[in-house]
Amino acid sequence: MPTHPLPWIAAGLLALAGHAAAATLTEGDARRFLSQASFGPTDANVAEVIQLGRVAWLQRQFTLSGSDYPGGAFVSHDANVVCPTGSPDTCRRDNFSLFPVQVAFFRNAINQPDQVRQRTALALSEILVVSGKQIRMPYAMANYQRIFLRHAFGNFRDVLRDVTLSPAMGRYLNMANNDKPNPAKGIEPNENYGREVLQLFSIGPWLLNADGTRKLDATGQPMPSYDQDTVEGFAHVFTGWTYAPRPGATRNRFPNPTNYEGTMVAFAEHHDLGAKKLLGGATLPANQSAAVDLEAAIDNIFGHPNVGPFIGRQLIQQLVTSNPSPAYVARVTAAFNGASGRPRGDMKSVLSAILLDAEASAPGTPNQFGKLREPIAQLTHLFRALGGTSDGVWLRSQASALGQPVFSPPSVFSFFSPEGDLPDDPGMDGPAFGLFNASAAFKLSGMLSAALNGKGVAPDAKVAGATGSRIDLTRWQALAANPTALVADIKRVLFADRMSSPLQQALLQAAQIAPASKPLDRAKAALFLAVMSPEYLVEY
C-alpha cells in the first residue's frame, strides 16, 4: 500500500475530480474499479464506467432497485406436512435447505444490474453473521439477507436494529425467548447476542483510534472496549422478545413457536425492568419497556466511536484490500461519522469513501496491496469477465466445494477472520487465505477446467427453469491463431491490463503447446493457466 496516501478530499471536490477524470479513465482503470465495486466487470459495465466516470456510475448504482430472493412467507417447519408421501424428491431440498436462496444469490450476482448493492449486502452478511448450519429454512435466510439488500445504501443503525430484531438472528444467537432473571427457576438472561453484537457486529473487543489502530494504555497495552458487566447489561436489555405469532395462530404467547417471518415481538412480563449498564459508562434507567430499552441500546452501540473504524476497515477488506493504510481507514471513518454532511452511519457515504479513495485506485504493489479473491468472488469474477451465463446452480455447488457455501459459514466468526495472517507473513492480514490451501487449489483447478471446457455445464434436470452454466470461448478460439493477440486480450479482460512479463511469457508458451490446427485447445490452455495464477487470484 502507498506510504504517503493522499489526504482526505471533501465529498464535493471528490465528485468534481471524478467527473473531470471520466474522459481519461482507461479500460484497465474501469475493470479494476469494477472488481472492487461489483461481482466482476462485464464489457457493458466497463463501457458504462468509462463513459460516466466512477462517481457518476456509483451514483447510478445507488438508484437501482434491489435484487431479491425467493420466498419469505412462513412455511410449516414440519417436513411431513410440507413434503408428504408422494412429493417430488426435491421437496425437502427446496423447503428445508438453503438451496433456493444460494442459487438465487449466484443468479443475481451474475445477471442483475444492482451490483454495488449486492456486493455490499454480501460483505455485511459476512460481518453480521447467521449461518445456514443452524438456520436451514430458506424463507428464514431470504428474510435475513433482505436486511442487507434493503439497508446497503441506507444507514448502519438500521442494519443493527433490524439484525437485532431478526428472528433468524434471534434463533442463531439465542435472543429469541431470552427471559428475564428468575433465581427460583435458575434462569439468567442469555449473553450470546449481547456479546457478539459488541465483539463482532459493531465495535470489536478493543478501543480503536479513528484510523483502526488500537488505543494503548500507559503501559502500552490495548484497552478493552467493554467488560463482562457490559455484556450482562446488554443481555438484560435483550430480554422479553420472541417470534411473531405464526399465520392463523389463535394465541400470542411467550415463547411463541419458531417463525422467521416478520420481526420478533416483545412481552412486557418477560423483560427485565432493572437498570442496565451499557457502553461508555452509560446506564439505562429501570422500569423501561423492552422496545425503549432496545432502541436506547442500539443508539448506545451505534454512537460508540469504534463503529466507524471497526466496520469501515472490514468493508475495505471485503471490497478493496486486506491491508488498508491507517490513513485510508481514517478517511472512511470520517465518512461514517458524517464528514460529508450526511448523517452518521450513512452507507452511501461510507461506500463512496471506500471505492473512490485514492488508495483504492492507486496502482499499489502485489506484496503490499490487494486481497485474495474469496471463492465466491473467484467464481463471479470469472463468469462476468468472460461473458459467462449461469442459472446459479453449478456455481452454488462449486462455491461449497471450494469451502464457501453461501450464507452457511462454520460459525458466527464467518468463513475467515478479518485479522487472519497472510501465510509466511504474520505482519500482514490475508483473511481469505483462511479458505485457501493445497486441497482448495486442487479443487479450484477442477472447477476452472470444467468452466473453461468450452461446452459448459448442462442444466440440472431437477431444478425448474434451469439453464446451466457456460462460458463461450468462441472469441478466444478466434484469437488463438495469433498467440500474442490472445495473451494481450487475456491481459486486458482478466487482469485489467496489469500482468507481469513472466506470466505473459508463460501464457504465450502455453498457447503454443497445441498446434495451430487446434485453436480451442490453445485458448483453453492459456485461459486456464491465467486464472490459476497468483496474479489473477490476488487482485491488486
Image (cartoon, rainbow, N blue to C red):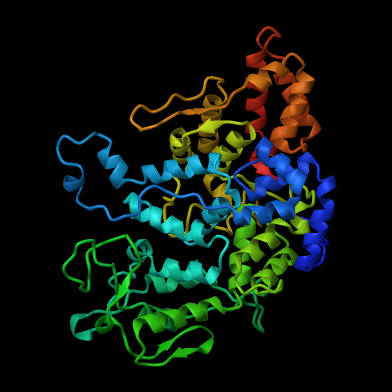
Q: Looking at the image, is 123 positioned above or below residue 182?
A: above
| Left or right: where 505 falls relative to 216 | right
Residue projecting furthest to the bottom: 286
Q: Residue at x 14, y 37 (%)?
A: 85
Residue 23 percent location from the top left of the image = 84, 46
Q: Up-down: is 403 above or below 181?
A: above
Query: In the rendering, at what x and y percent does residue 174 appear?
Result: 33, 68
Residue lying at 34% horizontally and 70% vertically, measured from the top left? 175
Q: How many marks?
A: 0
Asked whether, in this view, residue 539 is left or right of residue 191, the answer is right
Q: Quadrant of residue 264?
A: bottom left
In the rendered view, does 274 fall on the left or right side of 425?
left
Residue 442 in view of the camera: no
Q: How far across and down, in percent of the image, does residue 63 sit?
A: 61, 56
Can residue 357 be seen from the camera position used here?
yes
Figure quadrant of residue 20 = bottom right
